[in-house]
């Protein structure tokens, strides 16, 4: 159980907060590249870690991410003209390039050098994996760009989506490292889910609903092993990777299915972007797989048209179907694996009061993740190194394996937990 002071340290992510300073040390998934699809297209509002920003793609195809409010009279740059390698404010015409330099100031006299003194807040961006990433921390501490396996694959081998979640990022992320809920929240839907159906591991998961958990630190975060009994000689292990500060890789079901991953990125203290990724390291995704993902099935979600807000939401009680619940077509009555998760996480409120929790042995990963975040925040405040920054921390996989009893999963699954470009992953 956390104290209120510890909870506040974990969930507050705005400028100058302890957790906010830590999260700004990482490259942050800011928006889908498709949101700014072509040079000089309309700018897009972005909010991250409580900061209101504007993203745009300039005439040369480069991406900029600027503070939303013009440095002149603080009008919103959402209404700016995207033209000739810069955003021109619609109020008085001040124009900024992707680095925040004021390149034109038509409201000042000819020959004035005033614009040279203006440096509009701007954050560097990179594109990979269909995502625009930004770095919001100290320039001298900027790490190498992310090398998560899915982000390094061709577009034909991955599918990336995002959705708005109306909770603090932490309780969303904690749902991603809580393997014990799968046997309950999703138990009547896994046979129908295209990423789970027809796999040997699904049988073991359903037969043993009381997994035993072992958690250990990795270089980049945590290894979370969920152990289920198969027979007198073997255990079925599902090993999740949690990579600091907000990434998870879901243990796979069968090598014929794509892998799955998530990221949970704070918009502000009460909302976050939930990113969902399916990918396969050795083949293109099939048309039927992509069609399923586009429909919002599996770990993805159905949207209100024209938005990233989910069709099932708090305003309609997540379209709960009590008859489906009674008929055991859905454990909670909510349709879809993603919606089953976020409906329960949002039901806790925008920021859960963790002083009221009573955690058990199945919550070991959640406890250690909180400790690791708090410790990293303290280290970052002192200028020290933090886990999950180095590219080698990203080159990992999750796995599901059968191991003899007595074999530590860290040892028995060691090779399977390393991402090797072009090589098949290990899964039951």
Image: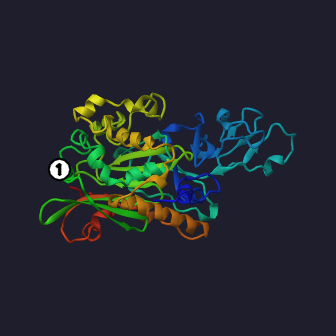
> Image check: 40 left or right of 257?
right
Percent across and percent down for residue 21 are 60, 59
Percent across and percent down for residue 67 are 66, 45
State the scheme by which the image is colored. rainbow
Task: Please tell me whether residue 179 is drawn above or below residue 221 in the rendered image.
Answer: above
Residue denoted by label 1: 203
Name the residue at 17% across, 45% down.
Answer: 198
> Image check: 255 left or right of 353?
left
Task: Please tell me whether residue 167 is drawn above or below residue 324 in the rendered image.
Answer: below
- Image quadrant holding the N terminus, namely bottom left
> Image check: 54 left or right of 127?
right
Which sits in the foreground, 260 or 288? 260
Which sits in the foreground, 265 or 173? 173
Percent across and percent down for residue 226 are 28, 59
Q: Secondary structure at mark 1?
A: helix
Q: Is residue 316 visible?
A: yes
């Amino acid at each position: 159980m956390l104290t209120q002071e510890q909870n506040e340290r974990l969930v507050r992510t705005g400028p100058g907060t302890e957790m906010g300073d830590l999260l700004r040390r990482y490259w942050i998934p800011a928006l889908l590249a498709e949101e700014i699809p072509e040079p000089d297209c309309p700018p897009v509002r972005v909010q991250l870690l409580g900061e209101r920003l504007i993203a745009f793609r300039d005439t040369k195809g480069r991406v900029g991410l600027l503070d939303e409010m013009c440095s002149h009279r603080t009008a919103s740059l959402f209404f700016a003209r995207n033209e000739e390698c810069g955003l021109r404010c619609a109020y008085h015409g001040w124009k900024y390039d992707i680095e925040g330099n004021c390149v034109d100031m038509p409201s000042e006299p000819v020959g004035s050098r005033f614009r040279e003194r203006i440096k509009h807040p701007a954050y560097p961006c990179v594109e990979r994996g269909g995502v625009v990433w930004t770095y919001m921390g100290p320039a001298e501490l900027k790490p190498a760009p992310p090398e998560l396996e899915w982000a390094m694959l061709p577009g034909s081998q991955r599918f990336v989506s995002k959705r708005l979640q109306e909770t603090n990022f932490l309780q969303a992320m904690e749902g991603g490292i809580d393997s014990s809920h799968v046997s309950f929240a999703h138990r009547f839907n896994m046979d129908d889910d295209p990423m789970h159906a027809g796999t040997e591991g699904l049988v073991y998961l359903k037969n043993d609903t009381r997994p035993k958990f072992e958690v250990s630190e990795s270089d980049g975060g945590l290894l979370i092993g969920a152990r289920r009994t198969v027979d007198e000689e073997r255990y079925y292990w599902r090993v999740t990777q949690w990579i600091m500060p907000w990434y998870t890789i879901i243990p796979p079901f069968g090598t014929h299915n794509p892998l799955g991953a998530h990221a949970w990125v704070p918009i502000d203290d009460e909302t976050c972007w939930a990113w969902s990724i399916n990918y396969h390291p050795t083949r293109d995704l099939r048309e039927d797989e992509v069609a399923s993902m586009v429909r919002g099935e599996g770990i993805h979600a159905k949207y209100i048209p024209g938005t990233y807000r989910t069709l099932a939401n708090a305003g309609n009680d997540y379209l709960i179907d009590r008859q489906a619940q009674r008929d055991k077509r859905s454990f909670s009555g909510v349709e879809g694996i993603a919606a089953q998760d976020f409906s329960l996480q949002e039901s806790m409120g925008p920021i859960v009061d963790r002083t009221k929790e009573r955690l058990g042995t199945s919550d070991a990963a959640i406890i250690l993740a909180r400790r690791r975040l708090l410790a990293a925040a303290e280290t970052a405040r002192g200028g020290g190194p933090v886990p999950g920054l180095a590219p080698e921390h990203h080159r990992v996989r999750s796995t599901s394996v059968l191991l003899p009893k007595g074999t530590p999963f860290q040892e028995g699954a060691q090779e399977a937990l390393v991402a090797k470009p072009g090589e098949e992953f290990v899964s039951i």
